[in-house]
Image (tube, rainbow, N blue to C red):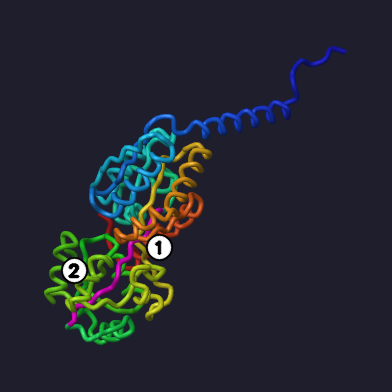
């Protein structure tokens, strides 16, 4: 009988799998072998830029390959995101962006990418706390008092924000929905004019970053009621969350993190994710972020993916309930 010179299909498949694993391990071991490009989807100087550049600096130090940061702001972060969505999925092009990445599907009718299918989450970096603040002329000192005051005057209280579709706007709409209030949205072209009119008493309520609100609160120009995120602030632990103060389940964290193009090799994704989380857990980076008004809140790729999908769904529900029309 003539023996077959061909190996059984099962053996061939096993050998192929072993070869693929060996190649993957080799790929991870050699990554990165050249500089990385970090596309920051917002303008220089803000929290996304600061956190991204800090993580990029530490990746450079850890791996000996330069991480080149490049700001590509515009259209709520979608310009930078589109650039990364079209990049080769080899791990050498990263997107650093914000909550806006989860907002964009609900506010733009036509996006050049799909936030779920075109990207893979790498790591959540930080949360940046916003707080609900009122002008001192509003006779309330707590969220429960604000709710009662607003319900007694439906449509009279004005809530300033930096614009339609931003985190502040979502905070208001989520608050109205969950608290049963009818506080009126007044969008401004930016944070500065919104804050100026709040301090001047032309509007009654707003949601401001903790770092910008606290100096005015300490001087008596504003009154801080609650943190809008899921956890209290490390910097101001005496300020309750909205959930603790009267609206159970309320949370609208502002967060920043990194994504890569879909199709990245799993081993490279794991290396980028684990190193980013390690960096964010170091005392030096933690202290620098806290000094800049941000709290390290690292999540690895898988956890960040679960969190991100929930954020997209939550925002879609807020937008639908409020009847906000996409652009």
Residue at position x 88%, y 13% in the image? 1
Residue 291 appears at what percent x and percent y?
Answer: 31, 60
Distance of mark 2 from mark 1, alpha carbons? Answer: 22 Å
Q: Residues within 10 Å of mark 1 (few under 14, many from 20)?
A: some
Instruction: Give SS at disc 1.
Output: helix
Q: Where residue 186 is drawn, which disc sits there? A: 2
Residue at position x 38%, y 81% in the image? 246
Q: Is residue 243 above or below residue 252?
A: below
Q: Where residue 120 is drawn, which disc sits there? A: none
Q: Nearer the viewer, residue 196 or 51?
A: 51
Instruction: Give SS at disc 2.
Output: strand
In the rendered structure, which segment of residues is drawn in magenta? 125-136
Q: Which residue is mark 1?
A: 314
Q: Nearer the viewer, residue 75 or 42?
A: 42
Q: Residues within 10 Å of mark 2 (few under 14, many from 20)?
A: some
In the picture provided, is 29 more to the left or to the right than 251? Answer: right
Q: Residue furthest right?
A: 1
In the picture provided, is 60 more to the left or to the right than 195? Answer: right
Residue at position x 52%, y 31% in the image? 27
Residue 79 appears at what percent x and percent y?
Answer: 27, 43
Assess whether residue 290 is covered by the magenta stretch.
Answer: no
Q: Nearer the viewer, residue 93 or 281?
A: 281
Q: Nearer the viewer, residue 325 or 276?
A: 276
In the picture provided, is 229 more to the left or to the right than 21? Answer: left
Give the position of the C terminus as an image quadrant.
Answer: bottom left
Marks 2 and 1 in Cβ contact (< 8 Å): no
Q: Name which of mark 2 and mark 1 comes first in the sequence.
A: 2
Q: Is residue 34 above or below residue 146?
A: above
Main structural element of the magenta stretch: helix, strand or loop? Answer: strand
Residue at position x 13%, y 68% in the image? 196
Residue 154 appears at what percent x and percent y?
Answer: 24, 82
How many numbered tags mark residues here?
2
């Amino acid at each position: 009988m003539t023996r077959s010179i061909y190996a059984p299909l099962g053996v061939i498949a096993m050998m192929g799998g072993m070869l693929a694993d060996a190649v993957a391990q080799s790929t991870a071991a050699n990554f990165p072998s050249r500089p990385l490009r970090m596309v920051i989807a917002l303008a220089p100087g803000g929290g996304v830029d600061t956190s991204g550049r800090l993580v990029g600096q530490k990746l450079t130090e850890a791996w000996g390959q330069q991480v080149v940061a490049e700001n590509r702001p515009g259209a709520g972060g979608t310009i930078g995101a589109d650039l990364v969505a079209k990049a080769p999925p080899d791990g050498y092009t990263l997107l650093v962006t914000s909550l806006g990445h989860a907002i964009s599907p609900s506010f733009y009718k036509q996006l050049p990418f799909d936030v779920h299918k075109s990207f893979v989450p790498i790591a959540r970096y930080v949360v940046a706390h916003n707080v609900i603040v009122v002008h001192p002329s509003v006779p309330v000192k707590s969220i429960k008092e604000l709710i009662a005051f607003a319900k007694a005057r439906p449509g009279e209280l004005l809530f300033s924000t930096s614009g339609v579709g931003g985190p502040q706007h979502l905070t208001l709409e989520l608050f109205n929905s969950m608290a049963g209030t009818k506080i009126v949205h007044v969008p401004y072209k930016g944070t500065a004019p919104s804050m100026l009119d709040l301090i001047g008493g032309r509007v009654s309520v707003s949601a401001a970053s903790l770092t910008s609100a606290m100096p005015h609160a300490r001087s008596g120009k504003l009154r801080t009621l609650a943190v809008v995120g899921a956890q209290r602030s490390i910097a101001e632990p005496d300020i309750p969350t909205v959930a603790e103060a009267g609206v159970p389940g309320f949370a609208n964290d502002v967060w920043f993190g990194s994504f890569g193009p879909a199709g990245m090799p799993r081993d490279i994704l794991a290396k980028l994710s684990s190193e980013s989380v390690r960096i964010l857990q170091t005392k030096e980076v933690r202290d620098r972020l806290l000094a800049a008004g941000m709290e390290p809140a690292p999540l690895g790729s898988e956890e960040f993916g679960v969190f991100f999908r929930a954020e997209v769904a939550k925002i879609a529900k807020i937008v639908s309930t409020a009847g906000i029309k996409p652009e």
